Image (tube, grey):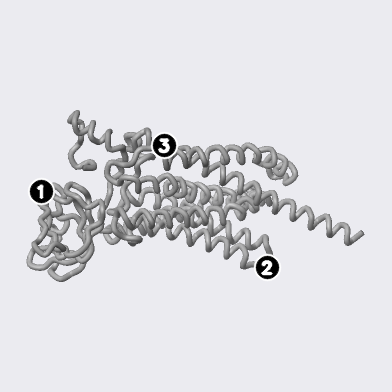
Amino acid sequence: MHRFANPARFLRIITAILPWSAGASAALLPLGLYFALIGSPPDYQQGDSVRIMYVHVPAAWMALAVYSVMAASGAVALVWRHPVAELVAQAAAPIGAVFTAMCLITGSLWGQPMWGTWWVWDARLTSVLVLLFLYLGYIALVNAFDDPTRGARAGAVLALVGLVNLPIIKFSVDWWNTLHQPASVARLGGPSIDPQMLLPLFTMAGGFAAFFVTVLILRVRAELLRRKLRVLRLAQAQG
Amino acid sequence: MTRKRRRLYLLLAGLASLAVATTLVLLALQSNLAFFYSPSEVAAQGVPEARRFRLGGLVEPDSVKRQADGVTVEFRVTDTRASLPVRYKGVLPDLFREGQGVVAEGMLQGGVFQASEVLAKHDENYMPPEVAKALKASGRWKEGEGK
């Protein structure tokens, strides 16, 4: 891990990954959308409304995964004071917030025709809304300090405290009565989704993950270059 | 012990105590976090009349009766051990059908649950219509698991 703490080396590594992740998302997202909208059967109960799942579920998975990335980077930044880890956590936050918002919006659009309501305050929906506020709170807190280092540390602590929400989201449907149905993919006894429907779901999830990596690299790279530029300008001004 | 080590242990200890605290809070709130109550819970607790709560369960097969006015529906909600009659006036969601999960909000009046809102609950099973038909034809369709 400490090998990646050097910003110049980190920049070289992520620049090498970028074409692969960009290529993977450019290939997987259209393919996944084709399978999701045309190449997969309707559901026996929900008909064509089930196709919302192929956006809703990958967005939910990414909302949780990006938060884990953010909290892990925050922990590395807190303990080992690696500046690159701070950057990664801050670059990931807005992307995760967008995935969470996407999950909530598509879920709402799906809930209206299927359940008969846009929103209910059950444990699953409420805990995901809390996740969105954790992301927004993190972004606000990091930017609330004049000293960026102090902002990054406060943000990392908030991100780590918010980590308790992840198992609550995952197991909310098992621990309590909820309107949201229990897990279909990651559960004991294997997935309860037909293989013809798992294919578009996993393709979309792969596309979402590759898209996240691509946007994360672009954001981290831009920030690293911005800092390099500032150092160069300062050196030039001092002549 | 280096400072990095100390920070790491502090962080781990902080996370562990946070996890314990959250677990305790969630255990304490256990009963208040339920979105709905099942008919047997309602029977066991003896909910007073005219108190609002949500009732959840499966729509009992062959229990749905539409009234003459066309908008009032009566059906029974069951959790296979106990069941309660429900009366509802309004539009039912697409997924409402016999054997399917529902969550109704309302109150008990004279032993009948007067619902002001009925939501459909869907299960975790997803499959194409042909597969569902084949499963039913081969007799491998499990009762109570997605109907």
Q: What percent of the width, then of the height, locates residue B46? A: 12, 63
Q: Is residue A231 above or below residue B2?
A: below
Q: What percent of the width, then of the height, locates residue A143? A: 62, 65
Which badge, 3 or 2, is on the more N-terminal residue?
A: 3
For badge 2, the amino acid type reads: Asp
Label 2, residues with CA under 10 Å away: few <14, some 14-19, many ≥20:
few
| Mark 1 and mark 2 on one chain | no
**Disc 3 from disc 2: Cα separation:** 52 Å
Residue depicted at x 30% and y 53%: A114
Q: What percent of the width, then of the height, locates residue A142? A: 61, 62
The residue lying furthest to the top in this view is: B138
Question: What's the mark number on residue A146?
Answer: 2
Answer yes or no: is residue A3 visible. no
Question: What's the mark number on residue A39?
Answer: 3
**Disc 1 from disc 2: Cα separation:** 67 Å
Mark 3 chain: A
Going by the image, does A95 lie left or right of B113? right
| Mark 3 and mark 2 on one chain | yes
Q: Foreground residue, B12 or B47?
A: B47
Going by the image, does A213 lie left or right of A56? right
Q: Tell me the SS state at disc 2.
A: loop
Answer yes or no: is residue B130 visible. yes
**Foreground mark, 3 or 1?**
3
Going by the image, does B32 lie left or right of A15? left
**Disc 3 from disc 1: Cα separation:** 36 Å
For badge 3, the amino acid type reads: Gly
For badge 1, the amino acid type reads: Asp
Q: Is residue B107 above or below residue A221?
A: below
Tell me the residue that label 1 is attached to: B62
Q: Foreground residue, A95 or A50?
A: A50
